[in-house]
Amino acid sequence: MVIRSSQYIISSPEYTKCPEPDRPEYAFIGRSNVGKSSLINMITNSTKLAKTSASPGKTQLINHFGIESSPTNKAEIIHWYIVDLPGYGFAKVSQSQREKWKKMIADYLRKRKNLVHVFVLIDSRHSPQQLDLDFVNQLGEWQIPFSLVFTKSDKENQRTVNTNVKSFLNALRDTWQFLPQQIITSTIKRTGREKILQLIEEMNTEWLSGEGE
């Protein structure tokens, strides 16, 4: 897949305010400070499409980015959305705000008609976190298709990263018969970009053929 253009579209306080569900949509979510904005920028070949911040919790709304791409070796233009969701770890905010964000995310994930796939970002520097495991299990209960994206693999040595990824997958085996797809990424080394784009390209093809609607 070749990214032709990417642009910010809108930030919405609830799923009913999102753009018309007329194209395939891929959501990115993870705990605060997992590197979500940097990953989105790497995927789209942009340095500032998604705003990065040193302060966790900057993303507080449902952010839509319009993407134009072409399938590999083709001139055809495909339109789709990347969605940047608030972190489910949440920043230091009030309990009422926390519950508001939680409902906004749940409603979007369960009710957005054109949501094709969710990319769940996991920080590869850490051993399995219960918050991540709980969220993944929740997606399973809701029967929402997703992949695991392990971020910041350049911030630790390869042995530590591999150990943490393996430990996370082993923890999932307690509740999952078949494990979801996993992608290890580094925005510095641009690792994992082509794998994510290839996966999206395949799902775009299914959507356009009518299988994803």
Image (cartoon, rainbow, N blue to C red):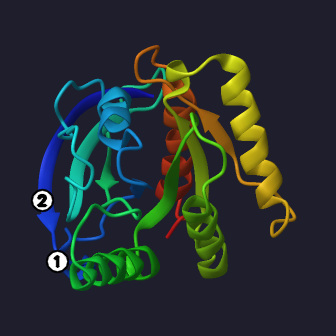
Q: Residue at horizontal 23%, vertical 85%?
A: 96
Which amino acid type corresponds to the residue marked 1 in the rendered image? Lys
In the image, is residue 74 above or below residue 111? above
Residue 36 position in % (x across, y down) = 36, 43
Identify which residue, 3 or 105, lies in the foreground: 105
Q: Which mark is residue 17?
A: 1
Residue 67 position in % (x across, y down) = 27, 42
Answer left or right for 81 relative to 177: left
Answer left or right for 53 relative to 141: left
According to the picture, the residue beneath numbered tag 2 turns out to be 10
Q: Mark 2–mark 1 contact, CB under 8 Å? A: yes
Which amino acid type corresponds to the residue marked 2 in the rendered image? Ile
Q: CA distance from mark 2 to mark 1?
A: 9 Å
In the image, is residue 100 above or below residue 33? below
Residue 95 lies in what quarter of the image?
Answer: bottom left
Identify which residue, 144 or 128, lies in the foreground: 128
Identify which residue, 139 or 101, lies in the foreground: 101
Residue 136 position in % (x across, y down) = 61, 65
* Residue 211 visible (yes or no): no
In the image, is residue 71 above or below residue 191? below
Residue 22 lies in what quarter of the image?
Answer: bottom left
